[in-house]
Image: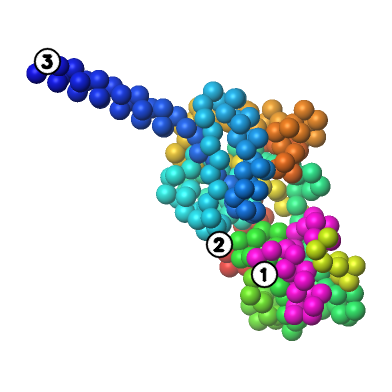
Amino acid sequence: MRKMRTYSVLAVVFIAIFARNASAEIKFGTLPRQSEAEMHAMFDPLAEYLTKEMGEKVSLVIPKTFQAFKEEVKAGRLDVGFSNPLIYVEVKKQVNIEPLALSSEVKSGTRMRGILVARKDSGIAKPQDLKGKKISFMDKDSAGGYIYQMLLLSKAGLDVKNDFTILPFAKKHVNVCAAVINKTADAGGIREDELDKVKDQVDISQLKIVGYTDYFPNWPFFATPKLNRDAAEKIRAALLKLKPNDPQNEKILKSARLTGFIPVSDKDYDELRKAAKVAGAL
């Protein structure tokens, strides 16, 4: 009987240790912009850096879709996340996530904006010319490839529900450009820095920019309610050590096309919330 009690105590201790170790793992989720293999290649170095800084394992999680990412956060299965600004404000409306740091990208820095493109021979010169036209956008959850342009068109005096036709979402920036080039769409909305990225896939010499959106804050790194305060602050400090454009950051951030992080607050995304409401996303 004594042996059985001893085994039971040991089993409880083992389970407690196992549970503590399991809970010590920090799950870091990001949006699946590329294939899972490509996403790991991009963000594993950052996860490894955070592991060293935290003294506990930080594991990268790549949900299958943007919607799946949102569901993972809502269900409490992620500790920290990295998402586009629109996904951040959408999730923030339902879950008390906390922005930790604002990312700086190689070309756009800490701000980004969207553009409207049309064929050079289209006769379209400005956003107002898109009344009655067909427009291709990237995705309903794309800040720089849909939401920002909807605010731009609204500010240009167009009724975003009735004055133009929104084609089925193209899902990729290159598909938006292709739709405009092949005349399936009269115009398209993409992130400004994506135009240069697709030049090896489509002939962008046929395109012209007919509108620029305002600038908005870039992607935030955030903590979910699942992560305790001390750990959140450690991650914030670790990220802010990676100051933008510091050459020492390259091994950690180059593959993710980032240059560093700066401080951020939730109110920085208030203008985006206005744009999202125009688009019906909030």
Q: Nearer the viewer, residue 204 or 165?
A: 204
- Contact flag, marks 1 and 2 (Cβ < 8 Å): no
Q: Earlier in the sequence, mark 3 or mark 1?
A: 3
Residue 187 part of the magenta-drawn span: yes
Taking the image as shown, residue 118 lies to the left or right of residue 70, namely right
* Residue 280: x %, y % from top left: 58, 68
- Return the mark for residue 170: 1
Residue 138 position (above or below residue 197):
below
Q: Amino acid at mark 2?
A: Leu
Residue at 30%, 28% (x, y): give it: 15
Q: Earlier in the sequence, mark 1 or mark 2?
A: 1
SS type, badge 3:
helix
Q: Earlier in the sequence, mark 3 or mark 2?
A: 3
Kindly indicate the quadrant of the structure image that contains residue 77: top left
Frontmost of labels 1 and 2 is: 1
Magenta part of the protein: which range?
A: 171-199
Residue at 53%, 37% (x, y): give it: 59
